[in-house]
Image (cartoon, grey):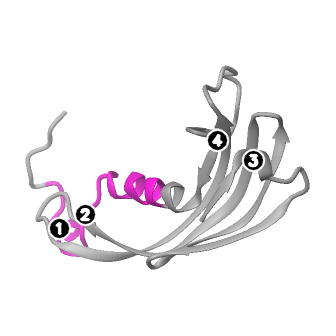
Amino acid sequence: MKIEFRKVPQVSKELEIVHNSVKIEGTFCKISQSLVKIDAVLQGSTDIDCCRCGETEEIEVDEELHLLLSDGIYKNDESEYLVIEVEDSIIDFDEIIQSELNSIKSDYYLCDKCAQLGDNFEKEF
């Protein structure tokens, strides 16, 4: 789902979008001329690769999202929210979901089998 930045209401609006097997559910609203706030939960399941053996497993995703979307370059450094800079004044919620899933997939993950093996492998520092 895409929405133009200028069409986002200043009153909190419900948000529920399903992308593949993951759903984002919460609220979003405009808090200034160039900022949109999203408070939501990312839930569902996704495939992830074990960092040791390479096996693919399906994991459950249940993450809270507190995001600020900036229409252009964000200049204020003091924010407790993760800031995403939006291009062309179009908010693409499917792209946000995909970005969050890629962030989860980039974490160091061990499957159950490899986690039981303990620390008997070479680590890179």
In the rendered image, which quarter contains the N terminus?
Answer: bottom right
Mark 2: which amino acid?
Leu
Residue extent of the magenta highlight: 98-119
Closest to the camera, between mark 4 and mark 3, is: 4
User: Label for residue 110?
Assistant: 2
Closest to the camera, between mark 2 and mark 3, is: 3
Q: Position of residue 56 (x, y in %)?
A: 21, 73
Q: 14 or 41, which lies in front?
A: 14
Q: 124 or 59, which lies in front?
A: 59
Please report the residue visible at 86 percent of the width from the left and 58 percent of the height from the top. 12
User: Label for residue 37?
Assistant: 3
- Using the numbered discs, state the Cα–Cα distance from disc 3 to disc 1 in whole angstroms: 39 Å
- The answer to which of marks 4 and 1 sits earlier in the sequence is 4
Q: Are marks 4 and 2 in contact (CB under 8 Å)?
A: no
Q: Are marks 2 and 1 in contact (CB under 8 Å)?
A: yes
Q: Position of residue 87 (x, y in %)?
A: 55, 38
Closest to the camera, between mark 4 and mark 1, is: 4
SS of the residue at dot 2?
A: loop
Please report the residue visible at 10 percent of the width from the left and 55 percent of the height from the top. 120
User: Label for residue 89?
Assistant: 4
Q: Are marks 3 and 1 in contact (CB under 8 Å)?
A: no
Q: Position of residue 88 (x, y in %)?
A: 58, 39
